[in-house]
Image (cartoon, rainbow, N blue to C red):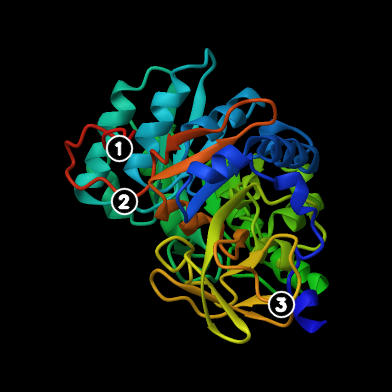
Amino acid sequence: MAEDLANPFAELDAGAYALPPELLDELQTPALIIYLDRVRANVNRMIEYTGGVDRWRPHLKTTKIPEVWSELLRAGVRQFKCATTREAQVMLDVAATVGERVDLLVAYPHRGPSLRRLGEMAATATNVDVSVLVEDPSLMAALPSSLGVFVDLNPGMNRTGVPLARPEDVVTIARAAGERFRGLHFYDGHLHDADLEQRRAKIFAGYEQLLEVVATLDLQGVRVAEVVTAGTPAFHHALQFERFSHAPFAHRVSPGTVVFHDARSELENPDVSLSPAALVLSRVISHPAGDIATCDAGSKSIAAESGDPCAYPLGVGGMTALPPSEEHLPMRCSGQLPARGAALLLVPRHVCPTVNLAEQAVLVEPGDRPRIVPVLARAHELAASAGGPPPNPR
């Protein structure tokens, strides 16, 4: 059926994701479930794709859970990206548990109080080097001395960054940063062409322009040590760009969604083999019509900003999620309606903001009792003097 074909996880073995009956008896829904064995499998797969941990700088905005970040550290990953001051503080706390240095790029153009907060964190960090993105040459005079600098470039996404046609601004920022200049940030997250060859051609064209900027800097006597590109839609192509393999700088890709995987990534990246590791457990609460079963996972528990369907039931065909409301997710069913009270595991279309919606998550580990842990790096700090993450909700 067409509906079955639209669900990329309809044929996935739901039994492999089965939760212990005693957990289902106690757990209220909706609930964020994290499968640690699949987290490890995805991390190992990414290390295979990149050819080694040194070429991967995963974005932490997806995962937000210290226990998951510890899995990345145990796998040998030492370079990371994040977006918020809360994510940065939680990573500094987690990184303090390892003996090696960790490198954290706060890949967001912070200003004012949040920039001061990052400067304070970096000044007191014992084993973490912290850098920020800069696109404004005038910011350099106020930038805390404890922070490294990556110049943010605009690859055509038109969200942030120095336009590629203004390399003189890049030179000005790099020179003002001096020894603190770490490299260039080029997030080409706007390239989602369904045709992989067309996507690859556009991505490669952008990298040629990026290398022109690097060449301009070189002519001005500015050395680029690192270039960071490629979120989830582009990372596989970035790894295939031959000129990066022979470049005089370190090139790193920065996808973070890949640790948990989601439906959008499954549909957009058929050349990448990963497994869903973060799902939302939901229950059927109503049969409002003969072909509709409504679940209790609405837009307050599954992100809905990326379009419909916002989620896909795992291992179930013939069910298509309709637009959610805050607490309700109706499902159109082509066959028999699931019973009221039936549990469904839902793979989010976009897992990153879905994780941010949850205050707690259930960690599932084969052979161990499930654990409820806080999603400690979710949301935002408000005051520049805030002492890190919110109180543990346990």
Which residue appears at 55% of the width and 34% of the height? 68
Number of the label disc, if any, that sits on residue 110? 2
Tell me the quarter of the image containing the C terminus: top left
Residue found at the far bottom of this picture = 290
Query: Which quadrant would residue 238 be assigned to in this image?
Result: bottom right
- Residue at the spot 51% in from the left edge and 40% down from the top edge: 362
User: Earlier along the polypeptide chain: callout 3 or callout 1?
Assistant: 1
Q: Image point 47% across, 38% down: which residue?
A: 65
Q: Amino acid at mark 1?
A: Leu
Q: Secondary structure at mark 1?
A: helix
Q: Secondary structure at mark 3?
A: loop
Do residues under tags 2 and 1 come within 8 Å of each other at their CB atoms? yes
Q: Can the viewer see residue 141 in this picture?
A: no
Q: Nearer the viewer, residue 29 or 358?
A: 29
Residue 6 can be seen in this image: yes
Pick whichever, 71 or 181, lies toward us.
71
Q: Position of residue 153 (x, y in %)?
A: 50, 59
Mark 3 = which residue?
A: 336
Is 330 placed left or right of 194 in the picture?
left
Q: For mark 1, what is the residue?
A: 118
Marks 3/2: CA–CA distance: 51 Å
State left or right for residue 303 relative to residue 89.
right
Q: Nearer the viewer, mark 3 or mark 1?
A: 3
Of labels 2 and 1, earlier in sequence is 2
Check disc 3: other Cα within 10 Å, few if <14, some if 14-19, many if 20+: few
Of marks 3 and 2, the one in the foreground: 3
The span from disc 2 to disc 1 (Cα, nearest Å) is: 9 Å
Q: How far apart, in angstroms, are the residues tagged by discs 3 and 1?
A: 54 Å
Classify 368 as above or below 263.
Answer: above
